[in-house]
Image (tube, rainbow, N blue to C red):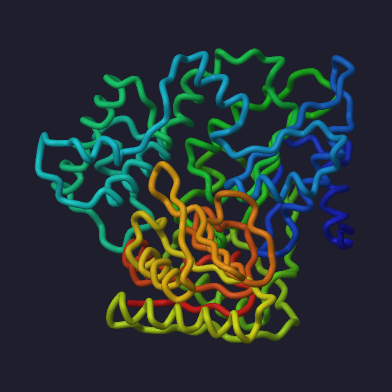
Amino acid sequence: MELTSKQRRAVDYVTSTNMRQFGVLIKGSAGCGKTLTGTRIAGQIQSQVNLSGEPAKVAVITFTNSLVHEIESFLPSDLDIGVSTFHSNPLVREILSVANCGPQTSASRFYNNYTNVDLKYGIEFYEDEFAMMFGNSITSWEEYRIFKRIGRKLGLREGEREHIWSVFMDYKKWLKENNKVDYNDVSNQVIENYHLFNPDDLYDCLIVDEVQDFSKSQLTAMRRLVKPEGETCETRQMMIVMGDMAQSIYQRGLTWKSVGLKFHSGNVFELDENFRNSKQIAEAANCLLEAEKRMNIADAEDYTAQEKPSRDGYHPIVVYCNSIEQQTEYVVKQVMKIRKEHPDQNIAIIARYGITKSEGLKQIADELMKENECSCTKSKSGSLERMQHTGLCLKTVDQKRFKKGGDKICLGTMHSSKGVEYDNVFIVDAMMMLYRTGTASLIVKSLLRSDVYFMLR
């Protein structure tokens, strides 16, 4: 795939021998080609030689398995560049093993057996709050009491925080007693134990894709995976981050300053062309983005001003539903219509949570199965893996790379669908997203390609 002139300039800019910065930021709007540009940078740096006379050790960390597959498809097969998510990164796994950390788990296993006090909220609430606490390396009540919580519409009173902190302490005790580590606490284990790394195993260059969706502790941990700055070496120690705060799906309140990365005109390259979205979709996304800026969720300079796409398309459709049944009826009807009129197009049905937790997504899947007389198989965890019928394939996006093609319907979450393109997107239970976050920007701009339906109920 050929680079545009602006993408080529970014590659030359970052790989130039005059570039001596440890941290480099490539920022750009959705569909501007950041990922493709990053893979070309990785290839050029990997061809350089380090002090030991070996090719520079380069790795790429991205946000989802879908993006891992996409990046691997961009890289020439003869390059020795590891691509992984944070949790599957070989160095991260090695440090967990050396530090004798147990299996990874989530709060849901603890929640189902918790009897110390009456729980005031559902499991999703506690999981979200614990993820925020681990993600910001909060270790004391005082830190949590005064922490400015980004991403919820309604603030928590001090008494509510005291309750959550009490449950959190019980959860950490349960983790220790059972020799387990929370999925979101892995980054803190790396930070605490990174001195156990063999320095020779660290990376000369680490490229982080979709950086805006990682937590503060994860980015801090990733800095520990790179050889120390200033080490004498023919290659430069670099951490290249690629992303755009406008595409964040978790609203963590992350700023570059908060993780010790200093960006200025000398180590920032901006890509502002949007090759993915239509003009109408881009306009709608920008309206949501302006609302987010007014809420001061991130520093204004962290956003990218994009060129307006020239391609025309359909405007997003907002559908207000009085019940989950009405939402299901509308989605199923529209899906069947699209399949009949545009058999070559694929369809995504996206919710905040997966099919085991989202009643809206589950009901839609059930009705689509009835409509097409198809059956499904489930994984050990009970999540839907695949439903198949003649001419129809329903699947979750995170099983493997979702390929464009006719008669394909994807059921996924915001997380699993990150960075994947679709012809038609239904975002169901959208009101729940807005209520939980206080901003409409969780309607992920990176997903929007053609027809988009926001299901508010």
Q: Is residue 381 above or below residue 8?
A: above
Q: Residue at x 86, y 25 (%)?
A: 55
Q: Residue at x 22, y 53 (%)?
A: 156
In which quadrant of the rendered view does residue 23 lie?
top right
* Residue 236 x %, y %: 79, 29
Q: Is residue 438 left or right of residue 155?
A: right
* Residue 80 x %, y %: 81, 31
Q: Nearer the viewer, residue 206 or 114?
A: 114
Q: Residue at x 54, y 19 (%)?
A: 95
Q: Nearer the viewer, residue 194 or 325?
A: 325
Q: Is residue 445 above or below residue 81?
A: below
Q: Residue at x 28, y 51 (%)?
A: 125
| Number of numbered labels in the structure image | 0
* Residue 40 x %, y %: 83, 46
Q: Nearer the viewer, residue 210 or 412?
A: 412
In the picture, the quarter occupied by the N terminus is bottom right
Q: Is residue 166 left or right of residue 315?
A: left
Q: Is residue 4 above or below residue 370?
A: above
In the picture, the quarter occupied by the C terminus is bottom left
* Residue 400 x %, y %: 61, 49
